[in-house]
Structure formats: C-alpha cells, structure tokens
C-alpha cells in the first residue's frame, strides 16, 4: 500500500472511532486508492565480481512493463555498481550463483548477475 | 562445394588480435562497383533468391574470393578452405528501435578448434545510427547458450560492425552478437552473412614478418580493462591456447602459471615458459 492510501486508511479508522465516518467519506477514500495492483520494476546488473561495490559491466531495466537497455555509453548508465542502485532504493532479489563461479577457467555468461526490484 | 586457395594475408599480430577479440574487421576491402551491384541485387530480390548471388561470378570474384577477405580467411582456416553454399541477408529496417536479443548462432559450440568462420559483408556504409550488428569482444571464450544471454542489455566494451561500404568482418562462430538500436530513418541496412570451413590441419603459414617475435607480444593476446569480463589473465590464457592451436602447435601449450608465458608482465627479461615453436 502506498503512503497516501495508508494515510487515508488511518484517517478513516480515526473517524470510525469518533463516530463521524460516513458512506461518502468511504467513497472518497476508496476513490483515491490505486486503480490497479502494484507493479514490479526489475533491474538486471552484471558486475565484475560478486561484491555489490564492483563495477557494472552490463545493465537492462524493466520499467512499468517496458524494457530499456539504458544509455549506449557506460559512463551515462544510472548505476556504476549494485551498491549505487541499492542506495537509490532498488532491492536485490537475486544474487550471483556462486556454484557457477568455482572454476575460473570456465565463465558462463558475464558471470556475476544481480537482479533488483522496485515496486510502483 | 567450392574450394578456394590463395595467399594468406594476415600477420602474427592480426591473428593474435583475432584470437583475443574473436573477430577481425577489414575496412572497405571490396571495390565500389561490386558493392553497388550487390545493393542493387538485394533491393530487387527477396531473401528466397539469395542463393543466386553465390553463382554470380562478379560476386564470387569481388567478395568470396576477394584477395584481402579470402586471404584473411585463408590465414585462419588454412589452405583449400571451403566457400559458402548458403548466404543470408540480415535486412535491418531504419528505423527499428527494438534491438535484437544477444545470441550466439545455432550449431556452434565453445572450442579452441576453429573449424569455420562466420563472415559478414557490408555492401553499403553502415554508421552507428543505422543499428549495426554489435559484438562482445572475447565472448567466444565465455560459456553459455543464447538462452543465458538473451536478456542482457547494454554491455561495456561492445564493438559495432560499422564501416565503409565493402567492409568484411571475420568472426569466431560463438561470438555473442545482436543488432543494435537504430536511431535514424533511411534505406534498409543490408548485412550479408556466410560461412567458410577449414579442410586442412592448422599450421602457422600466414604472413610471418622477418624479425617478428610472437612470444614478445603476450599483451596482444590480452583484452585488457575495461573489455575483460574475467580476470584478464584468463583472457590471455585462452587466446594463447587458440593461437597455438592455429599454429598447429597445441601440444606445446603447457602454461606454468604466475608471470610465465603468456601472462603479460610488461618490460622484463625473456619470459619463462615460451613454447619452443615460438622461440626466436
């Protein structure tokens, strides 16, 4: 639930306790609720190592249902490390699979992939 | 099956570059007349008629047997290599804002044995805005299938297949590639793709420059930051193994670790562990 909806709910509860809650007030409160369920944004970051502070080598983001590969030039990418993304409110939901990293002579894909989420 | 032989044109350094990066670009090697005839042919026909292009003598002479392009293929594939029996045109609409996903072509697998080359030919000039094919240098050493890399977006250090009309690129078949975003409107971008195959065992019979010491250039085998997606010594290791295989000397590849060959160590005394056939 977003902050605005939560505030509306708290106010309605207060009014109920005071005996001043009305049908009209409830319609007003529900009318301000999000029209649809919260949606997930995803951020794929491939990094040099498993450390969240290591340099990002690749990125792709899913925002409001649409993919974006980000700016063409790496120096213009929004995040240079996973840590920067975390500080910007992204939440890590998948860490690199360490089982794939045990043999340095075999690298699969770009190696260390983090997947992060935000909700809108 | 058409077999071709010609003079190899690549030097040791160029072969090393191919080994480390997985591709080599030959800018504008096909003549303008052939380029124009190719574009006209492609604009007048749909893709079901492309096989006819392989039988046109002007195309075979100008592109498939082009001295520079074929000489490079000959350097990497050895004598009497096989010319293509199929050819594809990756027509790129301009604009077409959606990039094609990263992938490596089907029926290719990661191995140091270079048995065929994937060749690209640009019959017209291609700029970055036209959505050229882009490659991830060194990805021929990165394992995984197209399913693993399909979702990747932009990647540091990618190289774009841009260049003047007549540019030919030779690539290792497992190199990751995709069509990049277009940012312009205009005619269709044509990109012809074909394969050539090895018939002869590998041997170091390309252009060997007098006085050149291949063991003195291990840095040529290293991708280097920021292009390396692994510890860069691993890139050097794999590129050196491929180079020795192409020399026909894979049995000499016994890396010893530490600052031994092929680990690039900067200015130093003669490096330890140089394969016998590379010692000048």
Image: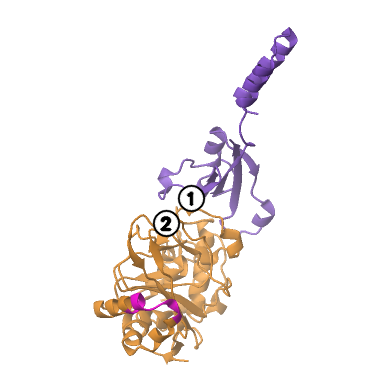
Residue B210 found in image quarter = bottom left
Q: Is residue B113 above or below residue B134?
A: below
Which percent across, then down, holds residue A61? 53, 46
Residue at x 41% of width, y 90% of height:
B4
Magenta residues span: B41-48
Q: Which residue is mark 1?
A: A69
Instruction: Rate crowding at label 2 as few (under 14), some (14 to 19) or many (20 or more) other CA atoms within 10 Å.
Output: many
Count of all numbered marks drawn on residues in the image: 2
Which percent across, then down, holds residue B138? 49, 63
Among the chains pictured, the one given purple colouring is A
Alpha-carbon span between mark 1 and mark 2: 10 Å
Instruction: Check contact, mark 1 vs mark 2: CB within 8 A.
Output: yes
Asked which colour scheme the image uses, the reply is: by chain
Magenta stretch: helix, strand or loop mostly: helix
Residue B8 found in image quarter = bottom left
Q: Colour of chain B?
A: orange
Between residues B100 and A51, which one lies in front from this camera angle?
A: B100
Q: Which residue is mark 2?
A: B181
Between residues B171 and B14, which one lies in front from this camera angle?
A: B171
Which percent across, then down, holds residue A99? 69, 54
Left/right placement of residue B258 relative to residue B62 reads right
Residue at x 49% of width, y 66% of height:
B262
Between residues B8 and B30, which one lies in front from this camera angle?
A: B30
Q: Residue furthest top?
A: A18
Q: Is residue A40 above or below residue B20?
A: above
Between residues A51 and B124, which one lies in front from this camera angle?
A: B124
**SS for tag 1?**
loop
Left/right placement of residue A85 relative to residue A8 reads left
Asked whether residue B216 is in view, the answer is yes
Residue at x 55% of width, y 59% of height:
B258
Left/right placement of residue A88 relative to residue A22 reads left
């Amino acid at each position: 639930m977003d902050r605005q909806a939560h505030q509306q709910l708290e106010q309605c509860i207060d009014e109920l306790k005071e005996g001043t809650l009305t049908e009209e007030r409830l319609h007003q409160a529900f009318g301000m609720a999000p029209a649809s369920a919260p949606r997930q944004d995803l951020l794929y970051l491939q990094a040099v190592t498993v450390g969240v502070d290591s340099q990002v080598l690749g990125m792709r983001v899913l925002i409001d249902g649409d993919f974006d590969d980000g700016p063409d030039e790496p120096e213009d990418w929004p995040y240079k490390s996973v840590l920067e993304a975390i500080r910007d409110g992204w939440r890590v939901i998948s860490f690199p699979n360490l089982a794939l990293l045990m043999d340095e002579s075999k690298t699969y894909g770009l190696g260390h992939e983090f997947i992060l989420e935000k909700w809108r | 099956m058409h077999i071709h032989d010609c003079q190899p044109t690549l030097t040791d350094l160029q072969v090393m570059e191919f080994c480390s990066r997985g591709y080599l670009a030959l800018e504008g090697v096909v003549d303008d007349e052939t380029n124009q005839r190719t574009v006209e042919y492609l604009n007048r026909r749909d893709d079901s008629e492309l096989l006819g292009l392989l039988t046109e003598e002007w195309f075979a002479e100008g592109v498939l047997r082009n001295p520079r392009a074929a000489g490079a293929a000959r350097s990497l594939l050895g004598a009497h290599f096989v010319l293509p029996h199929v050819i594809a045109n990756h027509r790129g609409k301009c604009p077409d804002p959606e990039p094609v996903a990263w992938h490596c072509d089907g029926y290719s697998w990661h191995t140091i044995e270079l048995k065929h080359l994937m060749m690209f030919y640009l019959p017209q000039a291609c700029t970055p805005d036209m959505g050229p094919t882009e490659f991830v240098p060194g990805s021929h050493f990165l394992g995984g299938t197209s399913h693993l890399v399909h979702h990747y977006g932009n990647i540091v250090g990618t190289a774009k297949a841009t260049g003047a009309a007549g540019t030919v690129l030779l690539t290792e078949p497992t190199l990751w590639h995709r069509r990049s975003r277009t940012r312009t409107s205009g005619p269709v971008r044509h990109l012809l793709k074909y394969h050539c195959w090895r018939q002869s065992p590998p041997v170091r019979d390309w252009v060997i420059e007098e006085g050149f010491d291949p063991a003195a250039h291990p840095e040529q085998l290293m991708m280097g930051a920021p292009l390396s997606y692994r510890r860069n010594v691993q890139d050097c290791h794999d590129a050196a193994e491929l180079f020795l295989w192409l020399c026909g000397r894979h049995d000499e590849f016994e890396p010893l670790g530490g600052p031994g060959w092929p680990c690039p160590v900067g200015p130093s005394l003669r490096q330890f562990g140089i394969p016998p056939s590379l010692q000048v």
